[in-house]
Every structure is written in C-alpha cells, then in structure tokens.
Amino acid sequence: MASASDFAMTIPAELESSLRLKTVHHFVTQRPWLDLYGINVRPVAPFGSVSRKPYVDTALIHRCLPDELLFEVFARMSPYDLGKASCVCRKWKYTIRNPVFWRNACLKAWQLSGVVENYKILQSRYEGSWRKMWLLRPRIRIDGLYVSRNTYIRAGVAEWKITNPVHIVCYYRYMRFFPSGRFIYKNSSQKIKDVAKIMNFRAAKADCVFTGHYTLSEEKVEAAVLYPGLRPTVLRIRLRLRGTTAGANNRMDLLSLVTSGMNDNEVNGHDEDILGVVEGWQDDETHNPDVPAVSHKRGLTPFVFVPFEEVETSVLNLPVEKMDYYVPG
C-alpha cells in the first residue's frame, strides 16, 4: 500500500514532465505560413497555354486549388475585386497582371467606342497595356451610384414674433450608369440606402425614376433625361469625371444643369436617344414657349461614387442634424 510520502515524491515529477512537454510542444508547433517564405512563385498561365509546364507549388493553398480553377475564379471577378485579390500573395499578384483579365474589363467599360477604336487607343496612348489603360483612361463606373448631396436654408414660421427659425433642407441627385449608354436619374430627399433598391429599369412611375442617355468623351460626360407630362421638360447635364486616386473615377463635377421645354414631335421619338434630340442646343434654347430654358446655378455639388456594397454604411445616410454639410473632396 502506497504511503503519503510516495505521493509527495511522484507529484512534483509529473508536474516537471508536463512542463517539459509543454515547452517542447511550443518549439515544434506547426506554422504552415512559414512554408511561404523563400518560395519562387510564378503566375498562372491560361489553361491550354503553351507556357504551361508541370509544376508543384509548395504553398498550402495552391496544393488544394489547381491553377486552372484559380484562373477561372479570377476570370469571373470584377476589376476592383482583382485589385484586392492581388494583395493576398505574390503569385496572385503576378497572375492578376495577366492582360486577359484587363482586356475583358476594358472592352466592357468602353463598349460604346467599339473594339477597333479601343485597340487603336490602346496602342497609341497606353503602350499596349490593358491594365494601364484601365487605370489611366477615364471611365464611368457601373458598380454603384453617383450621389450629389445638396443643402439649403429655408425660413420657418415665426413663433410669438420673437424668433424666426430656419430649417436646413437636404436633397440628393442620384445617377446610375450602364455600359450601353443609358443611365437612371432620381432627385429625392430619400437616403441612399433606400434609393439604391429602386434604381433600376423596373422601377414604377411613382418612384420618380427617369431614364436617359449619356456619352463619354475623354473626361467629359454629356447626359440628358426627359421628364414626361403635360409640359415635357428635358434635363441636360454636363459633368467632368475625375478620381481621388489613379483609376478610382469616384467623383464627377457638375459643370452645368439646364432644363428646357420640348415639343410633342420631339417627345414622341425620345425613347431612341433623347441626347441626340437635344444635341447642339444652346443653354437658353427651348422648343416649348410654356417651359422657359433655365440654367441652374444652385445645387451643383459634385457627385460622389458609392459602391453597392457600401450603400448601407455610407455617411450619406446620416441625417442633417449629424452632418449639416458634406465635403466630397
């Protein structure tokens, strides 16, 4: 039968062996990310390419993800997601530089110019680099909304003839562009998280969402939208595209905003191209004497681009009492 002295001797020994095992386990812990250091990576060649050779990549993620599948995943990503994915590792960075991804993105973004014209611009201005063309050539983004936030002060009702209160009124101009040369326009006091749900061609007339046409020449944007009704009015918009960083294209300066009247003959054929109808009109020109031409001087705040995935969290959803003025930058 074991005595108390025997237990007194064995317990410290077990504790000592346990501490020793923990120390050894600390030094032999597997760190798979260490396998990535010192590895010469190479970009993924398109499937079926002559440059493809049998190659075993020691990186853990590439052991489970074949090069063919990785290339197909990148081919289905948007250019902005490709930019984020290029920050993952060196292999992805080199792979995403493949001109195949950027060629498809460029031809889609500037499809109005035509394939032949795009190839001419590629060779003459961007040294044959589709990626350089994507970053430096002005383009209108289609993965979100351009929003212009405008405020003005309105006098309130005097109370007891002592105070004369004022109210800050806030309203927004929303524009959503499409590669086909069409765009959707809405002028509303609603926040962007509510408007983003109805900015499509299926929106009801009660939502006051109007469609128009636009053209892009360098950084200049010409757009026109028709307000139907008893006195049809066309809204002519001139904008200048710019970006806070290279390739961002996330700002549009509102150069001019003109409203003019249209006659019945012009209204009947507006579905084809309203911009072609008003092309060449002067700022003070109107084709309906009941609707004078007005060149608006207020509410010309620059447009800010908000991607669809950020409409719920954008600062433009803040009420006036929390953000009385917004600097677009």
Image: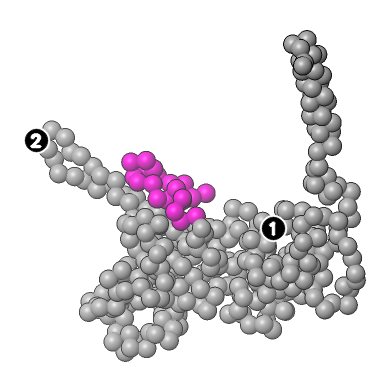
> Can you say which quadrant of the picture contains the N terminus?
top right
Residue 202 visible in the current orientation: yes
Q: Position of residue 226 (x, y in %)?
A: 35, 76
Per the image, the residue denoted by label 2 is 160
Q: Is residue 190 above or below residue 20?
A: below
Q: Residue reaching furthest front?
A: 1
Give the quarter of the image for residue 27: top right
Q: Residue reaching furthest left?
A: 160
Q: Amino acid at mark 1?
A: Ala
Q: Residue at x 64, y 61 (%)?
A: 81
Q: Residue at x 73, y 53 (%)?
A: 88
Q: Amino acid at mark 2?
A: Trp
Q: Is residue 227 above or below residue 35?
A: below
Q: Position of residue 324 (x, y in %)?
A: 36, 43
Look at the magenta stretch and give its main secondary structure: loop
Q: Residue at x 44, y 83 (%)?
A: 273
* Magenta residues, start to end: 310-329
Q: Position of residue 15 (x, y in %)?
A: 77, 21
Whole-number angstrom distance, CA of label 1 to CA of label 2: 63 Å
Q: Is 214 one of the magenta-colored residues? A: no
Q: Is residue 135 above or below residue 5?
A: below
Judged from the image, the secondary structure of the residue bearing numbered disc 2 is: loop
Of badges 1 and 2, nearer the viewer stands 1
Q: Residues within 10 Å of mark 1 (few under 14, many from 20)?
A: some
Q: Is 313 one of the magenta-colored residues? A: yes
Q: Is residue 327 above or below residue 115?
A: above
On residue 85, the disc is 1
